[in-house]
Image (tube, rainbow, N blue to C red):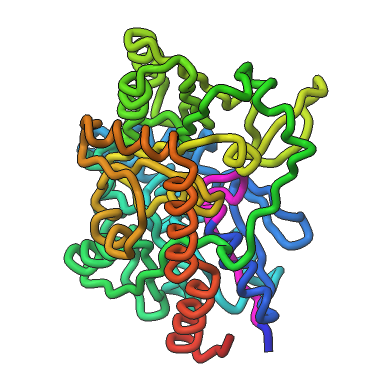
Amino acid sequence: MGKNIGFVSTRFAGTDGVSLEAAKWAQLLWDHQHVSYWFAGELDRHPDISMLVPEAFFDHEENQWINKRVFGVQKRTPYITGRIHALRDYLKIKLYEFIERFRIDILIIQNAVTIPMHVPLGLAITELAAESGIPVVAHHHDFYWERTRFSVNAVQDYLQMAFPPKLPNIQHVVINSIAQEALALRTGISSIVIPNVLDFETAPEIDWEFTKDFRAEIGVSDEDVLILQPTRVVQRKGIEHAIELVHELGDPKYKLIISHAAGDEGFEYLQWLQDYAADHNVDMRLISHYVSDKRGYSEDGRKRYSLWDVYPHCDFVTYPSTYEGFGNAFLEAIYFKKPLLVNRYDVFVRDIEPQGFDLVVMDGYVSERVVEEVREVLESPERRERMVNHNYAVATRHYSYSVLRKRLAFLISNFFGIEI
């Protein structure tokens, strides 16, 4: 008999990794008659199956007030503590309402007890789990110890209590083996690894008619070679390496396009990249104003493309990140059969590289070898076709929905006695 699954996070909206992976989990659970319901501070789910609580959003003004006073400092005042617990109390009440309204059988917490973007929400979830005994799956994407901005803080007591909590009714899931080892070492908590996945058993649907004028819209010609950086503009994405690559290719036909804007980590890096590209005579274009979470039209009637509309019109993908929890853009490039350059970040080296992908890889810098390999891929259709088809086959074996289905079945049946 199907169960009611309650997904909880600060946000389920847009194309961030947490929202995307949660939707994939929900889809596969639905295939087995389990109904998903959603609790968050920002939502794009249907109101009939969701509960919007604005105070649960990490960018809510009260939570931002708290964050400014507990990170980057080493002590907090009783007044700040009181504000944290006032919001915790309120959110816990709302979580109980959510469970009662939708008769939730299992909670799946998406990153809300992992990275402390919202300390009161993490505390509320932890207390609710301890009080109610409800079965909980805690799906962890990135831990606080993986981000330097949380290293100095005035809430270490709360981090040890709730990020993540160690309770008998909580089963923990991580997205890579490095996180699994770190979690066990730091907290004594065991976990299983469920990597990020895509539906490689089903080829992507491409709307060529809607996107036929994409290149004209962004101001490039059909003869130009588009090199896509499919990420936000944040420093750990290593976008300066993509600029160096295009510079070394040495032809104005190569254009670097960046899909997403700078986000919650500031705009200084973007300004530096723009100056760096200009100094290297690289045509770098930020196309975030053409890209939306979903395909459609803006209020002034201009087309807005999804990221998945962009991939088919590009020739090569750069992914020179210095750190990733897993690498959704990596899988997306392979899904759309695009050749790509990857920096050997830790999780890639440990979990992905051994699978046998055919890639251009760099080890912290763009060498002459890297440039020549990229040039060969771009100029040889045979080499490119062989590469992308091989990578698609490898990804189908290791990162498809069938992999997620098997591991979710193991998780739910072994820990909670529910067959899927």
Look at the image and tell me whether residue 247 can be seen.
Answer: yes
Task: Residue at 24%, 55% (x, y): give it.
Answer: 349
Q: Residue at (59%, 51%) from the top-left corner?
A: 12
Depth check: give the residue in front, 313 or 95.
Answer: 313
Asked whether, in this view, residue 108 is left or right of residue 36, the answer is: left
Above or below, 236 relative to 170: above
Q: Quadrant of the N terminus?
A: bottom right
Q: Is residue 286 magenta?
A: no
Q: Is residue 9 left or right of residue 325?
A: right
Residue 14 placement, left or right of 127: right
Name above or below for residue 371 compared with residue 413: above
Q: Is residue 369 above or below residue 40?
A: above
- The answer to which image quadrant residue 32 occupies is bottom right
Res 317 → quadrant: top left
Magenta region: which residues? Answer: 3-20
- x and y, in percent, of residue 251 in the image: 41, 17
Q: Which quarter of the figure has residue 376?
A: top left
